[in-house]
Image (cartoon, rainbow, N blue to C red):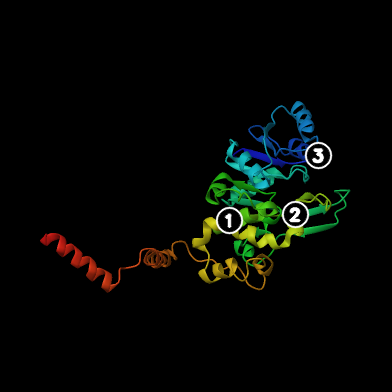
Amino acid sequence: MPDISFFIPAYNCSLTIAESVDSIMATNFTDGDELIIVNDCSTDNTTEVLKKLRQKYPVITVIEHLRNKGGAAARNTAVENAKNELLFCLDSDNVLAPSSIPPLKKYLMEHNADVASFQFQHSFADDKFNPVYIWTLPAGDFNPDDYLVGKNTPGQHGNYLFTRQSWLNAKGYAEGTGALDTWTFGLRQAITGAKMVVLKDTFYYHRLDYANSYWMRDAEANLWSVSVKAAYALLPFFDRIDEQFLNYMLGKGKYIWFYQLKNRPLKLVSEGSKKQFYVNLNKKINAAIYPKPSFLSRAVNKIKRVLKLTK
């Protein structure tokens, strides 16, 4: 069975990251695995906490960003420095259930999948054994079209097992997308054909902290920006998006399309099907930039050439 590179993007998480790390190392980490933590230029005492964790678990690798780059960049830095082909991202305030990773890895391998997710997210405030609510995914083969219609998806929480190849195919996490980093990564995996599975009756603990939530700070505080950031994340895959939907996404629906997916699903086209469209578009642009000379100008130029020859 292949080894796993666990990774944690860390920013101002001094109060929670030790529990996250312990949940990996206690019963989910095996020989050959690694844990990479990327400190995204924290301004609290996260750095000191990470030093103590390194003393407790010398196998941990800590990478320091010299400036704050955001969650997507921290995740990409971790994957770029990972040695294993299987990757698991755990957010710095979340907690794995004991011995939950080995069966998830086995399930991914048995189904020759690119992504394997837990079925449940136990969202808790103070006591992880007393969830405020439980968020659910359908078990078994996950339908990637659920991303297109605004249903629950693994990408909404981003704490799942995936292959390096699926990360490469998706062109990594889309940097500059704020709290949309995991949802857009999952969508990019879906667009590029990643096979996704959900292991029945499994879960992890998802901490609720509305005051310090990345989503609340970034997305809910700037609702207008969410659809814009999601569209930006899809830029490398515009050739896979139906042209009519793309025009809506960049035009009339620029600030709302993300919130309207249930009413107006994202529409994809097959790979290569827009090739002729771009060929025709290139011809139109070429004609606009380099217009054909008028009949009169061609006649004048011809006379000038003839006169030059007769001199």
Left or right, 311 with respect to 70, comes to left
Quadrant for the C terminus in the image: bottom left
* Observer-nearest of 82 and 1: 82
* Numbered disc 3: secondary structure: helix
Residue corresponding to mark 3: 19
Task: Inspect the image, locate mark 2, and give the three-letter code of the amino acid beneath it.
Answer: Trp
Q: Position of residue 136 (x, y in %)?
A: 74, 59
User: Is 31 displayed left or right of 283 in the figure?
Assistant: right
- The amino acid on which the numbered mark 1 sits, given as a three-letter code, is Arg
Q: In the image, residue 270 lies at what x, y percent?
A: 48, 64
* Residue with the mark numbered 2: 215
Among all residues in the image, which is located at the extreme front? 311
The image's mark for residue 188 is 1
Residue 224 percent across, percent down from the top left: 70, 63
Q: From the viewer's side, name the closer residue of 291 and 231.
A: 291
Which residue is pictured at 81% across the width and 54% down the height?
Answer: 123
- Residue at the image position 85 percent from the left and 54 percent from the top: 131
Q: Earlier in the sequence, mark 2 or mark 1?
A: 1
Kindly identify the residue that appears in the image at 73 percent across and 57 percent down: 219
Residue 180 image-quadrant placement: bottom right
Of helix, strand and loop, which one carries label 1?
helix
